[in-house]
Image: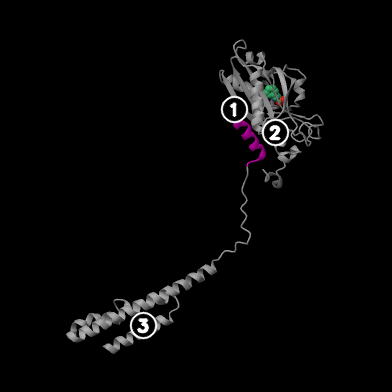
Amino acid sequence: MKEKLEQFLKSALDKIQKAETSDDLEQIKLEFLSRNSELNAIKKNLKDLSIEDKKIIGALANSVTKQIEDELNTKNEIIYKKELDEKLNAESIDITLPGTYNPTGKIHPLTQTINEITTIFQGMGYSLVNNENSPEVETEYFNFDMLNFTKDHPVRDTQDTFYTNVAPNVILRSQTSDSQVRQMLSQKPPIRVISPGRVYRNEAISARKSNMFHQVEGLLVDKNITMGDLKGTLNEFIRLYFKGSRPTRFRSSFFPFTEPSVEIDVQCIMCNGKGCRTCGGSGWLEILGAGMVDPNVLKGVGIDPEVYSGFAFGMGVERLAMLKWSVDDIRLFFNNDKRFLQQF
Ligand code: PHE
């Protein structure tokens, strides 16, 4: 029995010595220490032995078990380390390899500009008119008639309107000012809205002009609104948009739907007023048209001009984007060249 146990121990230690993987160790554990092992059989049969033998063989069996367990544990540690090293080596990452390129989409610079403009006015309490309330395929009625453009007034030609063959009076809107009329018809003063959108004009396309571009229209109607409010509001907008106050110039102008009317210039961003190609040597750049809402327009939408007054403004989105990022050709915004768009 004693010899048998010694033989058993030797063969177990031998196998453990030769084991190379954790699977090998599992196998050895099954063979030598499981319930079906020879060792267990000896332990079970101890009861049939004499008291003397029971003591000796029992102690020996226990010591054999312990030795096998210890050896298994030691070897297991070695194998575990070795296998881990192998795994880490096999899976090591070469941090000098270029990563996989995941192209991500970006918000178009014009949309970014519109968002920035509307956010500034929302901060001043204006609400945003959504697209459904501001159609691009518009009638002359909203685009011109209700804005105090007389039927045959030549100023209609200055906006080079695109007519459609849908119906005689259906056009592509030439300005976002149509939304002023729609807003004043759909809500009572006080009104404070901002309305961005596309407009179309039959222009020859060049570095400075496109036949489709974007405007943001603003309208405020309330009691006791003055030209001072208009000026303060737009100066504040310019300060926030250009991140710092810039010299502005209010030039008197003409629009049929505002009286008085102004055009607002900012000092040229490129040359700081010295005069350069971008500003045509004048040192100033026009960024928006504005004015006090003409009493005739108020009357047309059923608002009493004796009680209410208001101001409106319309700004060119492309112009503002070009100034902010020093882009010198408006066509870049529409060509969809990724090398251009990725820069914003
Ligand atoms: N709609 C005018 C244009 O496109 C700009 C404007 C808007 C002027 C609002 C006055 C008030 O030129």
The residues bearing labels 3 and 1 have C-alpha atoms spaced at a distance of: 87 Å
Residue 188 percent coordinates (x, y): 56, 18
* Secondary structure found at label 1: helix
Horizontal relation, residue 263 to residue 33: left or right: right
Q: Is mark 1 within 8 Å of ligand 1?
A: no
Q: Quadrant of the C terminus?
A: top right
**Disc number at residue 12?**
3
Horizontal relation, residue 327 to residue 223: left or right: right
Along the line of sight, the residue nearer the viewer: 155 or 325: 325
Mark 2: amino acid? Leu
Q: Is residue 221 above or below residue 325?
A: above
Q: Mark 2 — residue?
A: 320
Horizontal relation, residue 98 to residue 210: left or right: left
| Quadrant containing ligand 1 | top right
Q: Is residue 246 visible?
A: yes
Q: Are marks 2 and 3 in contact (CB under 8 Å)?
A: no
Q: Is residue 58 above or below residue 204?
A: below
Q: Which residues are magenta?
A: 107-120
Category of crowding for the residue at label 3, using alpha-carbon neighbours closer than 10 angstroms: few (below 14), some (14–19), many (at least 20): many
Q: Is residue 130 magenta?
A: no
